Amino acid sequence: MDRIFFAIGALSALISVAAGAFGAHGLRTRLGPDMLNVFEIGVRYQMYHALALLAVAWACTRWPHPATTASGVLFIVGTVVFSGSLYVLSLSGIRWLGAVTPFGGVALIAGWGCLAWAAARG
């Protein structure tokens, strides 16, 4: 699992940098300040959790525990739901997606809890 989480984390970081560049250069004149901010929040949290996946990959080698794996899965799901919903919301204006975003946030929070649990149980 360590290599899988590391690879997904690296790809997520790549996507985050590309999305950030797209937002800064391609969306600045197309989105209002509010929606551009929403997009940038998605980019920021994707990068945070891409780096978190790299930490999970390391933690898998140090503290192999089901909670370590759960944290990686939760970070992936949380990033897709949280950042993904913010990207689609900002680009499409579909407002009901704002109701989906907190579920991604809960998954990210749970991922941090699982990672802490795995380290404590290590």
Image (tube, rainbow, N blue to C red):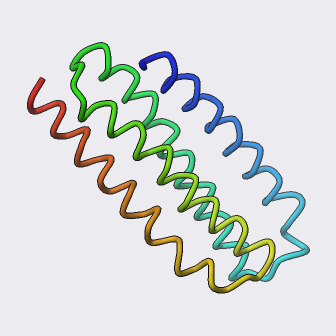
For residue 29, side relative to residue 83 (left or right) = right
Residue at the (48%, 27%) spot, across then down: 5
Residue at the outermost front position:
66
Percent across and percent down for residue 41 are 58, 64
Percent across and percent down for residue 65 are 21, 25
- Relative vertical location of residue 58 with respect to residue 34 in this rendering, above or below: above
Q: Quadrant of residue 108?
A: bottom left
- Relative vertical location of residue 10 with respect to residue 38 in this rendering, above or below: above
Residue at the (24%, 15%) spot, across then down: 62
Of 122 and 41, nearer the camera is 122
Of 115 and 17, nearer the camera is 115
Percent across and percent down for residue 83 are 59, 59
Of 104 and 44, nearer the camera is 104
Residue at the outermost left position:
121
Residue at the (42%, 20%) spot, across then down: 1
Quadrant for the C terminus in the image: top left
For residue 38, side relative to residue 9 (left or right) = right
Residue at the outermost bottom position:
95
Q: Quadrant of residue 64?
A: top left
For residue 84, side relative to residue 1 (left or right) = right
Percent across and percent down for residue 4 are 52, 22
- Relative vertical location of residue 37 with respect to residue 4 in this rendering, above or below: below
How many numbered discs? 0
For residue 31, side relative to residue 76 (left or right) = right
Residue at the (63%, 67%) spot, across then down: 85
- Relative vertical location of residue 34 with respect to residue 113 in this rendering, above or below: below
Of 114 and 19, nearer the camera is 114
